[in-house]
Image (spheres, rainbow, N blue to C red):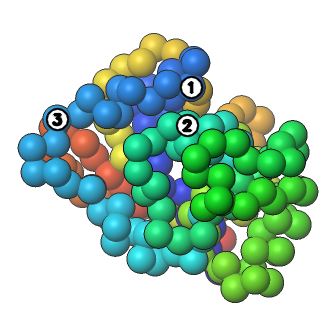
Amino acid sequence: MPNIVYIATSLDGYIAKVDGGIDWLMEIPNPEQSDYGFADFLSRIDGVLMGRKTYQIVQDFDQWIYTKPVFVLTQTLDVLPGKWAPKAEIVKGEPTEVIAALNNRGINNIYVDGGKTIQSLLSLDLIDEMIITKIPILLGDGIPLFGTGNSELKFEHTETDVYYGGLVKSRYLRKR
């Protein structure tokens, strides 16, 4: 029942600009219209767990990109805003409780997305795999993928793919 991070970062480790903007991800040349393995990744999962801020970014997308159930971890919202609200469900509680509740519903292979959500699951050692794509840009400041104060967690590098434009996607499995 793995919890899996699939995310892109700048070379300096940021997942978004200070204001939450991810426009720099959309500026990457992609003449082959590659999805960089995202569809294959989605075929491995049962559901998506994202934070409120990530949902707020996704709600501005022109297309809903998820083919699996989406759960928005939030302590502040009671109703999801935006045009994609019917496609997602609010979940509340501590991360361990939320993961257990999703597992009880048959959502066992979980795609975890969003800075705070990833950081909180890492701090509880609830991440089993990370797929991180490095984008060749320095943002200088922004929202970091990793927080501070976490315990040391060891991961094993299992593979790396290099894509057009210098994108480097690496996969890491948690060593327990």
Q: Earlier in the sequence, mark 2 or mark 1?
A: 1
Q: Is residue 22 above or below residue 160?
A: above
Which element type, helix, strand or loop, lies under badge 2?
Answer: helix
Q: Is residue 9 above or below residue 104?
A: above
Residue type at numbered disc 3? Pro
Which element type, helix, strand or loop, lies under badge 1?
Answer: loop
Q: Nearer the viewer, mark 2 or mark 1?
A: 2
On the rendered image, what quadrant is the N terminus found in?
bottom right
Q: Is residue 2 left or right of residue 96?
A: left
Q: Which residue is mark 2?
A: 57
Label 3 crowd (10 A; few <14 / some 14-19 / many >=20): few
Q: Are marks 3 and 2 in contact (CB under 8 Å)?
A: no
On the rendered image, what quadrant is the C terminus found in?
bottom right
Identify which residue is drawn at 35% across, 26% down: 24
Identify which residue is drawn at 71% across, 54% down: 72
Q: Is residue 86 above or below residue 110?
A: above
Q: CA distance from mark 2 to mark 1?
A: 8 Å
Q: Is residue 95 left or right of residue 163?
A: right
Farthest residue toward the top?
A: 140
Q: Is residue 122 visible?
A: no
Q: CA distance from mark 3 to mark 1?
A: 21 Å
Q: Nearer the viewer, mark 3 or mark 2?
A: 2
Q: Earlier in the sequence, mark 3 or mark 2?
A: 3
Q: Based on the displayed image, in which of its 4 quarters is residue 110 positioned?
A: bottom right
Q: Are marks 2 and 1 in contact (CB under 8 Å)?
A: yes
Q: Nearer the viewer, residue 59 or 170?
A: 59
Could you say where residue 61 lies in the image, as x and y percent from the top left?
Answer: 45, 42
Q: Which residue is mark 3?
A: 29
Identify which residue is drawn at 83% across, 43% down: 77
Identify which residue is drawn at 35% across, 61% down: 38
Q: Which residue is mark 1?
A: 20
User: What mark, if any, has residue 105 been given in the picture?
Assistant: none
